[in-house]
Image (cartoon, helix red, strand yellow):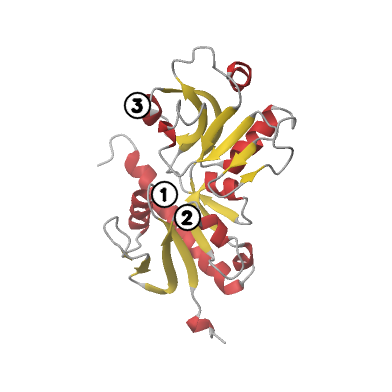
Amino acid sequence: MQTESQRTLKLLLPKGSLQGETLELFQRAGYELNGYTETDRSYRATFRDDNEVQIKISRPQEIPVYVGMDDFYDLGITGQDWVEETDSEVAEILPLEYGHIDIILAVREEREDINTFEDLMTHAEGDILISTEYLNLAEKYILEKTENKIAPAILTPWKRLNTRGSYQSPVTLMLSFGATEGKPPEEADAIIDNSTSSRRTIKANALKEIELLRQSESTLIANPKALRDPWKSEKIEKFKETLQKGLRRRRSQALPGHI
């Protein structure tokens, strides 16, 4: 049995698009991280002055799943989009004010007849194929838009699914492993994907947004069981307060006239 002095808080940090700004926030908060630069090949990192935190690096998509499982990880940083997509049992305890994205529905820009989801349903020729990494968000969106009348089929490389109805749906969601913007028109009629506010990648691939599904930013999440543990709860609260100091410093340094 571990003594309190041997206890550790298990933290997951994101690799990829959120990594640079996560590292910057930690530096502003006063944390010195070893092993968490984009050139590091290891999936483990450490705080220089805190050996009570065990850090592992993972993809944002997986972090809510692992933090939501009992006795896996206590704390993590990911996107709100992946918290919702994975439907994980986690507590969002601090929005982190970076990694802002929109989840959008987009089609080829030459489709002047399609400017809404309803247009897509009306004017698409034959079955509607939508490429997305967000199978659950997309399914929920389609059910909401059609008042629970259309349950999309779901196609992955391993299995064809329809969790709520028959396989005769006019809409099929196809799991994308990336480069989703490049799928239309050959592999898909439309996409549901994340995009920054500039829509630069969407425009570069001759697409246009027709619906906004969700907005998302990075967030600090915790395992509910860890929050009920007195030692871990206190450790998490101190960690949260330190990150809040980093957020305040970043806001103040972003003000006009700051030197």
Q: Which residue is nearer to you in this view: 161 or 238?
A: 161
Name the residue: 63% across, 67% down.
225
Query: Badge 1 local density, few (<14 within 10 Å), some, or many (20+)?
Result: many
Quarter of the picture containing the N terminus is: bottom right
Which numbered disc flags the more N-terminal residue, 2 or 3?
A: 2
- Judged left or right of residue 160, residue 131 is left
- Asked if 86 appears above or below 36 in the picture, the reply is above
Residue identifier under label 3 = 204
Name the residue: 65% across, 28% down.
170
Residue identifier under label 1 = 247
Image coordinates of residue 61 in percent, x first then y, are 49, 51
Query: Badge 2 local density, few (<14 within 10 Å), some, or many (20+)?
Result: many
Which numbered disc flags the more N-terminal residue, 1 or 3?
A: 3
Q: Answer whether residue 198 is visible to the viewer in this image.
A: no
The three-letter amino acid code for the residue at tag 2 is: Ile
Disc 1 element: helix
Q: Which residue is nearer to you in this view: 69 or 254?
A: 69
Which numbered disc flags the more N-terminal residue, 2 or 1?
A: 2
Is disc 2 in contact with disc 1, using a CB cutoff of under 8 Å? no
The three-letter amino acid code for the residue at tag 1 is: Leu
The three-letter amino acid code for the residue at tag 3 is: Ala
Q: Nearer the viewer, mark 1 or mark 3?
A: 3
Residue identifier under label 2 = 77
Image coordinates of residue 249 in percent, x first then y, are 37, 49
